[in-house]
Image (cartoon, rainbow, N blue to C red):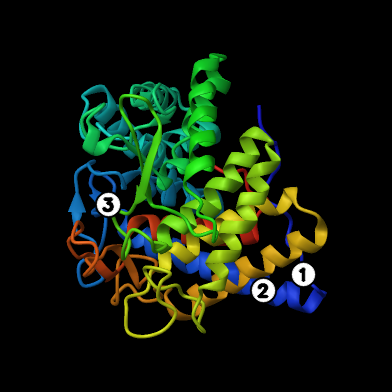
Amino acid sequence: MGRKAKCPAPRFYNREESFMKQAAYRAALDTACALLRNNLAAFTENFQSSNSEHNFYLPSENVEWTTGFCTGEYWLAWEHTREDAFEQAALTQVGSFLHRIENGIDVDHHDMGFLYMPSCVAAYKLTGNETAKKAALLAADRLCTRFQEKGQFLQAWGTLGAKDNYRLIIDCLLNLPLLYWASEVTGQSRYREIALAHTATSMANLVRPDHSTYHTFFFDPETGAPVRGSTQQGYRDGSAWARGQAWGVYGMALAYFYTGNAKCIELFREVTDYFLSRLPEDDIPYWDLTFVDGDEPRDSSAAAIAACGMLAMVPYLEKNEADKYRADAEKLADALIAHCAVTDPAVSNGLLLHGVYAKNSPYNPIPKDRGVDECNTWGDYFYMELLTRLTADWQMYW
């Protein structure tokens, strides 16, 4: 089905450096777990809102595309600490995800993977919980309903078949593992076939000649022919939205994991090297990779996502290249710990400062400013995943 590899063992240059790096990453993960422990009372029956306000999350119902990351943080914390409180909180939230999918609450979009992989698939992989398995399979079925034969892609959002929304977005590469998982546990090939088709369409259309990526790409609903790339959240249509480029890094690593297609490695190199080439001096990317200096907001979540993607690809690369990308991922982790990590619950009830949910620009009036220079749940989750990858022999949830 896919390439069965665990998180790669750490590769350090000498024993002293190994000890120091491992100690730093483990200490950062300990701090993250301590912060989450403080949140259990507020965010078990309720979820965190998608982004903080003045660095503090407000409680939310199980809505939007982001709540799975809250549960995923608890699973990562449980794996690290083995504290029952984290497991029980995560399982409580699993029940909410079953209720959500059975009642069709805010599920008319493609983000079933973001919602159900770090919450329910993780729960099933870690504990064998049947409620989690049922919820995740229902979510996979829901995701399949968005597949468009004309164009061979999963429509991101909007009324199915509507011309103004007949498109995919790069984020969806992280939703596809839900379909690969569903195919594996059910033995039904249709899930995998849809994932393979969407992957092929994404690979053919989302990466520009300069190796930057489109956020979103439109197709003709009558013929399925490619029409144009654009952005919904970046600075302009021709720029590289930082989080989108990071989804491309991780997405190509996952695509290779599940398909073994060597083209995925080629594209991974291209999109990753572009991302790395646009980092500022302190290694925390701006919200759009158009910017490499100045006063524009940073997006710490893009650094965490991209670093996780690099580590996911390391096991499948030759040693010199693997060492290079692991070192790049460590460099991003070091920057996040130094400049963005929350260490004091009086400062924030999140884990990673300086993220961006959405940013308005003179060339893209679509998004309203939201969660600018704030924590966000996916940034927190991928920061924890990054630290987990760097300190443990980890079986990924994706």
Label 1: which secondary element: loop
Q: Quadrant of the N terminus?
A: top right
Q: Nearer the viewer, mark 2 or mark 3?
A: 2
Rendered view: 174 above or below 299 = above
Left or right: residue 176 versus residue 276 is left
Q: Earlier in the sequence, mark 1 or mark 3?
A: 1
Marks 2,3: beta carbons within 8 A: no
Report how many numbered discs are placed on residues in the image.
3
Q: Position of residue 311 (x, y in %)?
A: 63, 56
Q: Position of residue 369 (x, y in %)?
A: 19, 65
Marks 1,2: beta carbons within 8 A: yes
Q: Which residue is mark 2?
A: 21
Label 2: which secondary element: helix
- Find the distance from the CA under tag 1 to the CA under tag 2: 9 Å
Label 3: which secondary element: loop
Rendered view: 395 above or below 130 = below
Rate crowding at label 1 as few (under 14), some (14 to 19) or many (20 or more) other CA atoms within 10 Å.
some
- Find the distance from the CA under tag 2 to the CA under tag 3: 31 Å
| Tag of residue 43 | 3
Residue type at mark 3 is Phe
Question: Which sits in the foreground, 205 or 327?
Answer: 205
Instruction: Please tell me in which quadrant of the rendered image residue 99 appears.
Output: top left
Q: Which residue is mark 1?
A: 12
Q: Position of residue 182 (x, y in %)?
A: 50, 23
Rate crowding at label 3 as few (under 14), some (14 to 19) or many (20 or more) other CA atoms within 10 Å.
many
